Every structure is written in C-alpha cells, then in structure tokens.
Image (spheres, rainbow, N blue to C red):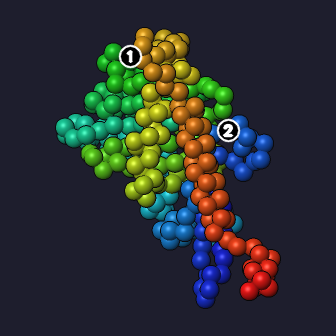
Amino acid sequence: ALLVVRRDSDRLRQYVHLGTGNYHHRTARIYTDFSLLTSAPELTEEVAIVFNTLTGLAGYPGLKKLMVAPFDLSERLIKLIERERDHARAGKPARIIAKLNSLVDEDIIERLYEASCAGVKIDLIVRGICCLRPRVPSLSENIRVISIVGRFLEHSRVYYFENAGQPDIYLSSADWMPRNFYRRVEIAFPIDAPDLRDEMVNDILPSLLNDQVKARELQPDGSYVRLRPAEGAARSQAQLHFRERSRQTRKAAAELQAKSAEKLIPIKAKREERKRA
C-alpha cells in the first residue's frame, strides 16, 4: 500500500495505491498483478489508519472496507465463506472464486469443504502449493482447482463471493497461508467501482477460468492434468488475451495523443505567420 498526501488548491487530499504485488522494478517485468489507484475517502482514511497502527500511533480499531492481517483477515475471510455456505443452504445464489499463489491454511480449507458440501460452487486458481483436494465424493465435489503457469508469473490474488447476487470482490496481497494471516502485514481491499467490477466479472475471471492452453487441473489424488481445447474449438489463453488487450489499449492511447498533438501549432510557426501578415 502507498499513501500520498498532497495539497490540491486550498486543501489536502489523500491518494492511495493498493496492489497485489511488490514495489520491485525487476519482478514487475515478469509478474502479473492488479492494483488500484484511488482518492475515495472511504479507502484513503482506512489506509491512513493502517499506517498509524503500524507506526504505533494508534491501536487497530477494526475497519469496514479493508481486511488486514495479522489482525482480522483470516477471521473475516472465514465469515465470508460461511456466508456463502449459508446462502447455498437457503437456496440463494452462492459461489466462491479465489485466485492465489498458495492454499495451505487448514481453517480455510475446512470451511471450503463445508461450503462445497452445502452446494457452493467453488473455483480456485492456485498457481503453487494447494493442500486442498478437489472432486472428492461427499467432501469437495463442487470444488475445481486449476493452476496457470505461463510466460508471466501469476502473482495476483482475487477473492470473489457471490453473496446471493450482490457479489463482494476483493484484491489482496495475501495468500491463504498461516504466514500471511498471522506473521505478515497484508491487506485485502474491495473493488467497488461499477466499471472495474464489470471488467473483473465479465472479462478477467472468465478468461482465467477458461484458459485451456496454460492451465492444469488438480485431481483428487494430487496429480495435475493439462487442459487442452476441444477439437475444433478456439484456443483460450488468459495471458495472451490480456497482453493483446493491453497492446490495443496502448495503441488507442497513442493515436489519441497523436491527434491531440496535431491540433497544436508550434510557437515558431505562429511568429512566422504573423511576419508574413
């Protein structure tokens, strides 16, 4: 997390940058991460509280938007999983999607098993260590686990909870491991902006879940099977899709900048025009 306090016109304004990765110029070349830059007061104020807690200026009061380790991240994640379980039992829409580097924490795994037994559909994208076993009858029949290993290192963490049709979406720096929950300072932050939520739900998560080129699916016995597109079907590769979309975005931005530059008349040209007049 990064907090910037700047004087704008006649008042101070806070900006925060929250991300799933590290501030490191080398890893930035090969890691894939998500980040959020915002001046929304409900987030900037809570980030300021986190920094005050870390510097010893105040105790941790509990926050509304942010979930923070080692204080309450594990506890609140368990409550979110249990809420999906309860929704499924009540016949309401329930689903969990989590993208992580590692899944090790026993308490979280037990809650995921309970949610699966209650009928919650669970999709896990776990690049590295996964101690949960999917597709085990009467235990994890509703859990699917895939690992995506491609040109870039999948490093982002995403937590999605359906919440009876009103989804909660979080980005985080934390894997679901005891060391992240209890021995590190980690933050999970919500994605509230409608356009960003729409992008996550309708583009990013589906692209990851439907990868059939670089994804491998975890089996009940702990082995992995590489996924392949069906015969005649289009090849779906998440990283390639995101890279192409990024290229198109940069191209459009460059074209827009070029058009804006065409409208500018150099000062020297203006002077020569006045002399001729």
- Number of on-image labels: 2
Q: Position of residue 197 (x, y in %)?
A: 42, 51
Q: Which residue is drawn at 72% across and 43% down?
A: 28
> Residue at the bottom extreme?
10
**Callout 2, which amino acid?**
Tyr
Is residue 251 shown to the viewer in this render?
Answer: yes
Name the foreground residue: 117 vs 233: 233
Residue 93: image location, x then y, percent: 25, 40
Note whether 273 is above or below 37 in the view shown: below
User: In the drawing, what numbered circle is on residue 31?
Assistant: 2
25 or 168, nearer to the observer: 25
Q: Who's the residue at 55% across and 41% down the image?
A: 245
Residue position marked by numbered label 1 in the rendering:
136
Q: Residues within 10 Å of mark 1 (few under 14, many from 20)?
A: some
**Percent of width and height locating residue 43:** 51, 65
Query: Which labelled disc corresponds to residue 220?
Result: none
Q: Quadrant of the C terminus?
A: bottom right
- 1 or 2: tag closer to the N-terminus: 2
| Residue at 66% in and 77% down | 6
Instruction: Give the class, few, some or many, for how many residues have Cα within 10 Å of label 2's Cα (few <14, many ≥20).
Output: some
